[in-house]
Amino acid sequence: METIIDYLKKYGDVSLIRKPFNDVDSLVLSQLSYLKFDGLVASVSQNEPYLSVRELERIKEKGNLFADERFAKDNRELFEGVLSGQRFGTVKLNYYVNEIDPEKETQFSAVTFALEDGSYYVAFRGTDETIVGWKEDFNLAFSKPAQGQLSSVEYLNFVGKKIEGVFSVGGHSKGGNLAVYAAMNCREKIRDRIGKIYSHDGPGFRPEVMKAERYEKIADRIVKIIPHSSMIGMLLESHENYKVIESKTFGLMQHNPYTWRVKDDHFMYVDDIYSGRKFVDHTINEWILSLTEDQIHAFIDVLFTVLEASDTDNLIDFTADLKKSMSGVVSAIKEIDEDSKRVMGDIIRALFEMASERVKQKIQCRTEEGLLKLSEMAEENKARLQEKSGENRKALRERKGQRVKKAGRKSK
């Protein structure tokens, strides 16, 4: 089962001039943006030249490039694959941003890649290992823009003035959402120069955001790619113009880009996500949109108050000493006031009630479809019987006529 790592081994020496930039290349750069370039790649405020990946390899020990332990092994292989070939071996990086602000509840990171064919790719990082990053993901459920979304617009407006020609933007997970949001809301002259907008399993937007913003102006340039058991990418997704690909794993683990299956120079596409998964996704989206913003605020605040009680600020430390972390969580749950418990109970109950109602509707729909099918079958059987009866009557008339003719000949 080939992945983006295998893709780099097979096509790493094929230049972008010979084989133009494609969907798999976009995922490679989106995933590369998860590396920690702090202290290595120039920031937006430094006005420094681009740094090549080969130079980055030489000075990487000065930073902590593979600090994200969740994907440290895969990220190292990805980086080595990028370095070893002609396709990305000459890539240069600049305008790196990495902001984590617990008070603003935001985790925002982006970097710009200059490619060998003269084009650029602006990559927005998805959710990292920080708890504040995951909290911002939940904040995407609001009609009001999250801080990360506002930052993405500022970043694209800044970079758009620094680079020339047509360029692409993209990202994985929350990074895909930020790429689409930034493209919708950046300056018109910059938006007109965007060739493609990639969202790799990135969540969508509330209906009011879609209507209020400039989605229609960029809709035909969006390339949304989701695995066939997608949950994150189907959150608040209201359009059907997405591509579905195979993954070598199941469930939520499919959100990991290193599990996405590649065949030759393209993803392995399938017709649609699993019907059972689609049912769950639609139920969750209906539930989210049924909540008031006050309810969403209350749900998120209580949930992350409990998580933050673990005395860690990232998921790596949280899971490293799970017993200690859960001890803090359990203590925090006991301290939740009665009003908050009631609100959380009402919200969760609403989800189960909605799920139950959708199950009933699905059963009713299937029952009606079954009855309709039976009715159609009965009509078909009736028509066949009538046809057969007509044929039998015709045959009887013919035999009777033949007997009459025989009798007439004998009487003569």
Image (cartoon, rainbow, N blue to C red):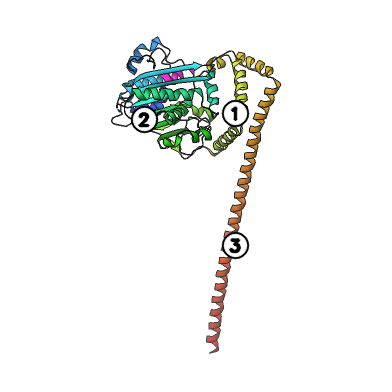
* Vertical position of residue 190 compared to residue 397: above or below: above
Secondary structure beneath label 3: helix
The image shows residue 54, relative to residue 388, as above or below, that is above
Question: Could you tell whether 222 is left or right of 336 in the image?
Answer: left
Regarding residue 89, the answer to whether it shows in the image is yes
**Magenta residues?**
63-75
For the residue marked with disc 3, what is the amino acid? Lys
Label annotation for residue 293: 1
Q: Given contact means CB atoms under 8 Å apart, are the residues at marks 1 and 3 in contact?
A: no
- Mark 2 is surrounded, within 10 Å at the Cα level, by few (under 14), some (14 to 19) or many (20 or more) other residues, namely few
Q: Residue at x 61, y 46 (%)?
A: 365
Residue 382: numbered disc = 3
In which quadrant of the rendered view does residue 304 lie? top right
Q: Position of residue 24 (x, y in %)?
A: 39, 30
Instruction: Decide which of tag 2 and tag 3 comes sooner along the chain.
Output: 2
Q: Earlier in the sequence, mark 1 or mark 3?
A: 1
Give the residue at mark 2.
Answer: 189
Helix, strand or loop under label 1: helix
Q: Judge left or right: residue 169 versus residue 295.
A: left
Which residue is at the far left? 18
User: Does 66 appear in magenta?
Assistant: yes
The amino acid sitting under disc 2 is: Lys
